[in-house]
Image (tube, grey):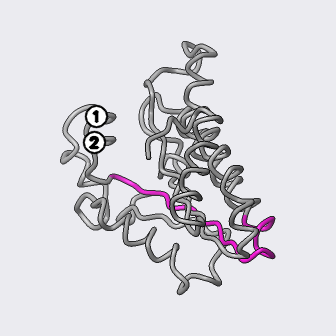
Amino acid sequence: MQADVRDNTQVKNMVQKTIDTYGKIDILINNAGGLIKRVGIAEADDSLWDATMDLNLRSMFYCCRATIPHMIKNNYGRIVNISSLAADNGGGKLATIYATAKSGMYGFTKGLAKELGPNGITVNAISPGLIVTPFHTKAETGNLESMVPMIPVKRLGTADEVASLALYLSSDDAGFITGSIYRITGGQR
């Protein structure tokens, strides 16, 4: 199913189609996001701020709000929010707005974990560093490989490594883990 997760109506329809097709929703992974444009704060306009918050935060809010009632009904659920190392270090050059949005995911994750814990629902976040994905190959200036020296493990991460962590946090084995932020950065801070 495809949906623009910045659009509340499309999110509601996507969730309802999922319920109609599968009968329930056990896992929600909020992975929509991106660095729309690198610009200094003094040059940023309201539309860039709004677009960045819509893509990185509002989409997560819409997906959670539409999904949570179904999880509460089943007294079970796993929510994993994909943030970014930018939330910890302020982001790369001219990425303050993006870093701010990703930082907001931390507070949302921790607050929602407290809210939903009594309903058998865990909420955690993953903060990837430099991962070989189209996001980094498009967003970074210069050669991605040139950034390897600043990573303690001396290599870029893989999407499979992030997916493995998301899979674990979505499993019953992680039932006592909630409100946590997992950094998968190769030691980069």
Residues under numbered marks 2 and 1 in contact, where contact means CB atoms less than 8 Å apart: yes
Q: Position of residue 70 (x, y in %)?
A: 70, 62
Q: Nearer the viewer, residue 88 or 1?
A: 1
The amino acid type of the residue labelled 2 equals: Pro
> Residue at 60% of width from left, 24% of height from top?
49
- For residue 149, above or below residue 169: above
Helix, strand or loop status at disc 1? helix
Q: Position of residue 36 (x, y in %)?
A: 45, 27
> Residue at 54% of width from left, 12% of height from top?
43
Query: Residues under labels 2 and 1: Cα distance?
Result: 6 Å
Name the residue furthest front. 20
Name the residue furthest bottom. 173
Q: Bounds of the magenta span?
A: 113-130
The amino acid type of the residue labelled 1 equals: Lys
Q: Position of residue 25 (x, y in %)?
A: 59, 65
Residue 131 horizontal side relative to residue 54, left or right:
left
Helix, strand or loop status at disc 2? helix
> Circle 2 sits on which residue?
134
- For residue 128, above or below residue 140: below
